[in-house]
Amino acid sequence: MHIARTLTDLRAAVAALRASHGPIALVPTMGALHDGHRALVRAAVTSGAAVVTSIFVNPLQFGASEDLSRYPRDEAGDLAILEACGCALVWMPDVATMYPPGDATTITVTGPAQNWEGAARPGHFRGVATVCAKLFGQVRPDRAYFGEKDWQQLQVIRRMVDDLALPLSIVAVETVREPDGVAMSSRNRFLSETERVRAPLLHALLTETARAVAGGRDASRALTSARNRLTDGGFVVDYFALVDGSMLTEIPTIAPDARLIAAARLGLVRLLDNVAA
């Protein structure tokens, strides 16, 4: 497994991989890797492509009230995980490489980026879209892999790739969960023991609500009940909504491609999850 830290090294390594393997697959990450990331890398490896994984904690997607310095980092652990998964190349740029002096271009996204995380974290998806566009330009992959846990992010990236006619495909990988249903996330490590015990309620209520709405229960009442039960369970609910799966617009009843999405806080940790409805 090769590690590249400069654009010159990256371009040479990618060229060598393309000559020897053909297709290139990219797995963008911010490090602090867990089984969800392993699933992305393994899916990419299984596809037969040479896999490039990026590790870059992107400051552009952190808001003014979010602590960039608190984001977990474990370079040695991450590299060991990637090598064991069959990753061929790790791209580890610094901030100056990604955002050099005089850098003046960002990607503004609307559509599926406007509500939910877009409203709760102004500028977040601008940062996500910009860094992904840069990574796609640097690596020039044939496909890139993203997890369904961050459902809105997945739709934003798909929209950007389609709108800009970028020459790659976006591959979605199913959310990886703990045995009790909690979606794996790098931030889960910050949950206290008490909060971790409460955390499975979010996914449990998503799946229960999806069954109820699919069975004919009034969606508005089912969503209100779920929000109240989360609040009673110690969560601070940002949203718990039924949406169109691709555009993320709120819908009143079950429909093809519907998705239930949720974000709620336990202490200092903000949990995101979603299920098909």
Image (cartoon, rainbow, N blue to C red):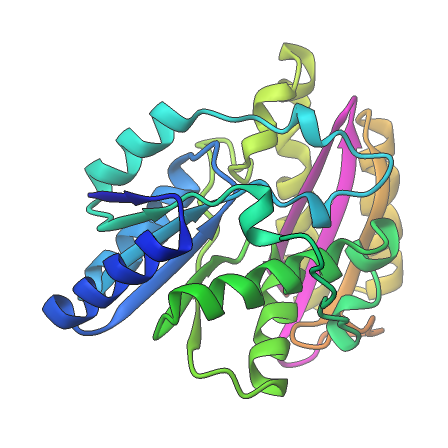
Q: Can you say whether 167 is above or below 250 in the image?
A: below
Q: Can you say whether 196 is above or below 54 in the image?
A: above
| Left or right: 59 in relation to 169 | right
Closer to the camera, 208 or 91? 91
Query: Residue 254 lies in what quarter of the image?
Result: bottom right
| Left or right: 105 in relation to 177 | right
Instruction: Indicate yes or no whether the magenta region holds residue 86.
Output: no
The N terminus is located in which quarter? top left
Closer to the camera, 164 or 37? 164
Query: Residue pushed farthest top?
Result: 193
Q: Position of residue 238 (x, y in %)?
A: 85, 45
Q: Which residues are magenta?
A: 255-276
Instruction: Indicate yes or no whether the magenta region holds residue 272.
Output: yes
Q: Can you say whether 221 is above or below 268 in the image?
A: below
Q: Residue at x 79, y 27 (%)?
A: 233
Q: Position of residue 42 (x, y in %)?
A: 27, 51
Q: Position of residue 176 (x, y in %)?
A: 44, 45
| Left or right: 90 in relation to 201 | left
Q: Can you say whether 100 is above or below 272 in the image?
A: below
Query: Magenta segment, principal secondary structure?
Result: strand
Q: Residue at x 27, y 30 (%)?
A: 80
Query: Residue 189 lies in what quarter of the image?
Result: top right
Q: Residue at x 37, y 50 (%)?
A: 53
Q: Residue at x 58, y 64 (%)?
A: 154
Closer to the camera, 204 or 270? 270
Query: Residue pushed farthest front?
Result: 102
The C terminus is located in which quarter? bottom right
